[in-house]
């Protein structure tokens, strides 16, 4: 009886240490990838897609460059 309890105890320790306590690495890296992705917007004049941070807003429309705003 004592041998079985010892074997079950060792199995439980191995399970707790190696299997159950692993951190979710993929979950953390996936969230980082999603937060690094930028929204893309289409230029109102030429149709080129640019990041929203780099786009120029003029008269309620987004443009990719000063040339598209002026032209």
Image: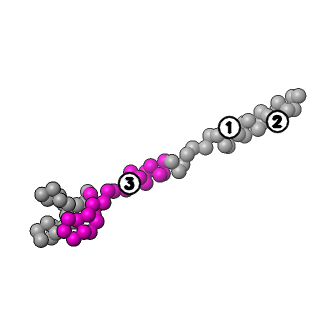
> The C terminus appears in which quarter of the rendering?
bottom left
- Residue at disc 3, secondary structure: helix
Q: Residue furthest top?
A: 1
Q: Is residue 61 magenta-colored?
A: no
Q: CA distance from mark 3 to mark 2?
A: 48 Å
- Residue at disc 2, secondary structure: helix
For image coordinates 82% across by 30% down, the residue present is: 5
Which residue position holds label 1? Answer: 16
Q: CA distance from mark 2 to mark 1?
A: 14 Å
Give the residues in magenta. Answer: 28-52
> Which x, y percent locates residue 25?
54, 49
- Whether residue 53 is situated above or below residue 15 in the rendered picture: below
Image mark for residue 36: 3
Which residue position holds label 2? Answer: 7
Marked residue nearer the N-terminal end (1 or 3): 1
Report the front residue among 37 and 22: 37
- Residue at disc 1, secondary structure: helix
Q: As drawn, is 29 to the left or to the right of 44?
A: right
Quarter of the image where one finds residue 65: bottom left
For image coordinates 20% across by 60% down, the residue present is: 62
Marked residue nearer the N-terminal end (2 or 1): 2
């Amino acid at each position: 009886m004592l041998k079985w309890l010892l074997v079950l105890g060792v199995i439980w320790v191995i399970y707790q240490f190696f299997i159950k306590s692993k951190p979710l690495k993929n979950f953390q890296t996936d969230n980082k990838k999603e937060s690094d992705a930028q929204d893309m917007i289409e230029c109102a004049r030429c149709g080129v897609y640019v990041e929203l941070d780099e786009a120029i807003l003029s008269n309620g429309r987004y443009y990719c460059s000063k040339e598209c705003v002026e032209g």
